[in-house]
Image (cartoon, rainbow, N blue to C red):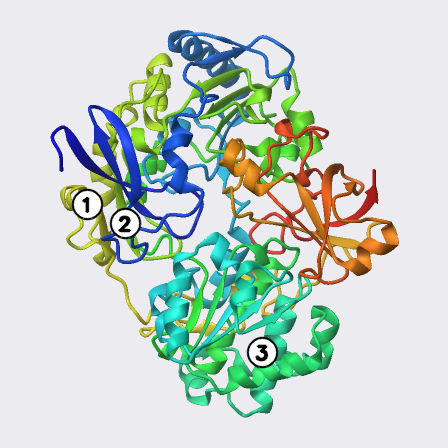
Amino acid sequence: MSGGERQVPGACPLDCPDGCAWTVTVRDGRATGLRGNREHPYTRGALCVKVNQYLEHTRAPGRLMFPLRRVGAKGEDRFERISWDEALAEIAARLRETIDTHGGEAIWPYQGTGTLGYLQGLQGRAGSRLWNVLGASRHRMTICASAGSAGLRYTQGTSEGMDPEDLRHSRLILLWGTNTLTTGHHLWRLIQEARTKGAYVVAIDPVRTRTAEQADEHLPIRPGGDAALALALLNVVLAEGAEDRAYLARHTHGWEQFRSRVEEFTPERAALDTGLAAERITALGRRLAHTRPTAIRTSMGMQRHAGGGTALRTLACIPGVTGDWQYPGGGLHYATDGAHGGNLAALTRDDLLPQPVRGLSMTRLAEGLLKTDDPPVKVLFVYGANPAVSSPDQTRIRQGLAREDLFTVVLDHFRTDTADWADIVLPATMQTEHLDIHDAYGHHYLAWNEPAVAPPGECASTTETFRRLSRALGLTEPALYDSDEDLARQFLDSDHPSLDGITVESLREHGWARLITDRLPFSDGFPTPSGKLEFVSETAAADGHDALSGHVPAAEPASDRHPLVLISAAQHFTINTVFGNKPELRRRAGPPTVVLHPDDAAPRGLKPGDRARVINGRGSFTALIAVEDRVTPGVALTEKGHWPKLQEDTRTGVNATVAERDTDLGGGAVFHDNRVEIVPL
């Protein structure tokens, strides 16, 4: 290390399973470099194409540096600079007025995945202490993974599963609805390691993605057909006599009833729901029947469908029938976040609530702003989120944001589409400028993020913003003023065995720590009421759902007016809408595009490069057309993450066409259960 130069440990804060550790080089108070931490056992120093340019992003010309007040009409993006004192005084006055007139529940703190940190972000519900003291409505984080998590809890008691590092031991790997090379590329190294030992990799995806192209086999399943395929694969396992009867007897509940349902789903029946040939289903079923251990890696896309919760619930039944939970490299991996025993209660302080409050679903922002009463939402405080772009039913969301009686505050790094509708915009710090602790939802490591440089301009961290707002409100609760280091120590103050030996000091010194977890997570039983994997769930029945795992079809079937199902997948150059304003990444991503199969493009008179309108009864957006056979007939593909305000001829995006409708379980969003028509311009 040269004189005046230091290396500062950090971690990527973004909505990605890989949770990369990084190191920032600082000289004379300025960050001069950022690279992956090569010592991290999982991410090994490799950052993605997006985060490799993170330092440039912190210095982008359009970055917010000072508080702003709206001076034009809502949505016009016209603001004036004001001081923090002015901004806080105005926000505090509106909060007090709202509480006095309508009660605390008229406040909606709307938080997203812009940062996943336990101090500054979503995982620790940053700001919850203040919202609890004020009695604000509880923000229900339903938009991302809630359907799948709910389904998995009915079957196995938790959304946690196999250790992803154990994929190196797998002999059959089903990459089911996940584009690993785009949305979590570090897992690919472990998959490749397994392949050198003879593993066979199958990508089950409606799209021939980067990952599908690298797999040994690709099954182009119809969107929403996942549970039907899972049941048909188990039907073949039974036909082969390959069910693990000893495991079923010892470790599962309700097998005989579930077996009857499995027997109904022959490959021929499932072919109708999946669009796959019965012969291909049978072939994969036989491979599954006779290959141990088998790993299923799935992710969020599958559960963003009318039957998404049931799909994950049914997929989780597969290792119960095959007995794969007995083996390293066997089982199902959906998410790992929450595997630690961090003291979340100490962070969120729900004991500060003066009385129980209602929950408002993130998936239903338009409904919350336009229809909720008793009380109506009067203050919307948005942080770590860009719902004017990312949430369903974009047109109605904008109608809600346009309400003159709604006071909206946005805490962000840039003037996003959502910030255009705000009354006050506050400048937030970025990851190199504040303290945080991160886990990941794709591995079992904690990471320490030390602030490397001072915040630019007048930017403030999420925690500091809420400390300042608490002072402006004159609140005296001591917990509202704990420092970031206090919060970190409170979070790690836990007797949970996963955190044994992990302290603020050790994390700060090393930058990361491996959580102590069971390599065979359910060797001592499942955290369900029966203590077993539950094919039949009395809990599900009590909640008003089918007691048996099964298949739920699409809520929007094809129609003459809207015959195409539109998928809005993650793109390679943004994470949700983060980096959607970065010129170089925008150039590489290209403009909004819709991919059609040649059989769908030709009858519509559409050719590559044409401009077209994607439309249904909810709204529309404009996109370029690509004609490729990487989608099947009847399926249209676009990618999320574009900022409508930066497009030349449209101010709407894909979510203008998506219904504000809940999934079957968990209240999730149905981004991929969306029927449209596409017409030339």
Nearer-the-camera pick, 482 or 530: 482
Tag 2's secondary structure?
Answer: strand
Residue 232 on image: x %, y %? 63, 78
The circle drawn on residue 507 is 1
Residue occupying the point 40% across, 8% down = 83
Nearer-the-camera pick, 464 or 599: 599
Tag 3's secondary structure?
Answer: helix
| Amino acid type indicated by mark 3 | Phe
Q: Earlier in the sequence, mark 3 or mark 1?
A: 3
**Residue at the spot of label 3:** 258
Q: Relative to residue 411, is residue 186 depicted above or below? A: below
Mark 3, residues whose alpha carbon is within 10 Å: few (<14), some, or many (≥20)?
A: some
Q: Earlier in the sequence, mark 2 or mark 1?
A: 2
The circle drawn on residue 664 is none
Alpha carbon separation for disc pair 3 and 1: 46 Å
**Residue at the spot of label 2:** 446
Residue 431 on image: x %, y %? 34, 33
Q: Earlier in the sequence, mark 3 or mark 2?
A: 3
Residue occupying the point 56% across, 48% down = 570
Residue 359 on image: x %, y %? 52, 38
Q: Relative to residue 21, is residue 380 depicted above or below? A: above
The answer to the question of whether label 3 and label 1 lie on touching residues, with beta carbons closer than 8 A, is no
Closer to viewer: mark 3 or mark 2: 2
| Amino acid type indicated by mark 1 | Leu
Nearer-the-camera pick, 275 or 574: 574
Quadrant of the image occupied by residue 132: top left
The answer to the question of whether label 2 and label 1 lie on touching residues, with beta carbons closer than 8 A, is yes
